Image (spheres, rainbow, N blue to C red):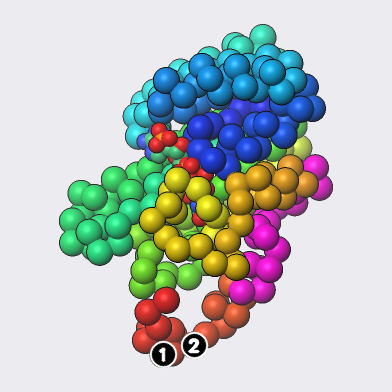
Amino acid sequence: MNILLIGASSAIATAVARRYAAHQSGLFLIARDGSRLAPQKQDLTIRGAARVGTHELDLLSNEEHEAAINAAIQFFDEGDIDLVLICHGSLPDQEAAEQDFDLARREIDINGLSVISLLTRLAPHFKKQGHGLLAVVTSVAGDRGRQPNFVYGAAKALVSTYLQGLRGKLLPYGVDVLDIRPGLVDSPMTQQFDKGFLWSSPELVARKIEKAVGRKKHTVYIPGYWRLIMAVVRLIPEAVFKRLKF
Ligand SMILES: NC(=O)c1ccc[n+]([C@@H]2O[C@H](COP(=O)([O-])OP(=O)(O)OC[C@H]3O[C@@H](n4cnc5c(N)ncnc54)[C@H](OP(=O)(O)O)[C@@H]3O)[C@@H](O)[C@H]2O)c1
């Protein structure tokens, strides 16, 4: 399999890459921190990857997305890309983002618009090749605007809604679109939080992502119980919900 990982140094993408390396996949990694790409490439090669390419990019630079995707296409010798996993993100300080529009916009840019930019550039290539899977890590936070994280949640909801429409558009071309909605994951992004029983490891999330990719799912909650939790959260009447601080 030829796989393009965007936000490749994230804890979740790292765990996913390791799983696919063990299946001798070809991997192309796009990430912001170039100093982490060389050791990651070495790690994945040792784990069995057929070949590993890397590209350093701050994904806020939307104008550079095209070149990065072209680098991946060239790396695979103009061959097909079977799977793209978009997995970068940032969890803002909600209070700060409510008071500073520039910060809110930056967070919406990285969690929302940069993903739309990537998908806009990936979609024509996938239409042309006539198969493949575009998978994006969004979040359960996009399911409802909760007080502690609604800037992040709004950006994720933007992406989830976009994916719903794109899925239909790409269906006639044989291209699938997967919305991956993890719950609480113990990763650098959440290092400041106390962890409890609802928390998952990046490795568990990666295992579930691989399973969802194999089954050509369109939306997965990871772990699955988050589908039920969020169904209940969505059912809470707004008159009650607006009083909840969680
Ligand atoms: N952790 C959770 O509880 C949770 C829950 C639901 C969804 N998610 C989503 O899961 C995905 C992966 O997150 P994670 O939990 O694995 O956390 P993570 O390890 O902190 O990964 C976040 C990644 O995003 C990258 N990133 C941020 N801004 C960037 C930019 N401007 N350009 C390029 N890369 C940038 C970071 O790069 P650097 O390493 O260079 O900082 C980091 O590798 C994200 O989309 C996140 O929103 C996480």
Task: Say what amino acid the circle numbered 2 marks.
Answer: Pro
Cα separation between marks 1 and 2: 5 Å
- The image shows residue 66 at horizontal and vertical percentages of 46, 23
* Residue under the image location 65 percent in, 31 percent down: 17
The image quarter in which residue 45 lies: top right
Task: Say what amino acid the circle numbered 1 marks.
Answer: Ala
- Per the rendered image, the range of residues in magenta is 212-229
- The image shows residue 90 at horizontal and vertical percentages of 39, 47
Mark 2 and mark 1 in contact (Cβ < 8 Å)? yes
Secondary-structure class at tag 2: loop
Which residue is nearer to you in this view: 30 or 192? 192
- The image shows residue 164 at horizontal and vertical percentages of 60, 54
| Residue placed under numbered mark 2 in the picture | 237
| Left or right placement of residue 108 versus residue 86 in this view | left
Q: Is 240 drawn above or below residue 233 in the view shown?
A: below
Quadrant (top left/top right/bottom left/bottom right) for the N terminus: top right
Q: Does the magenta segment cover residue 227?
A: yes
Q: Is 165 drawn above or below residue 43 in the view shown?
A: below
| Residue placed under numbered mark 1 in the picture | 239
Q: Is residue 167 visible?
A: no
The image quarter in which residue 227 lies: bottom right
Q: Does the magenta segment cover residue 6?
A: no
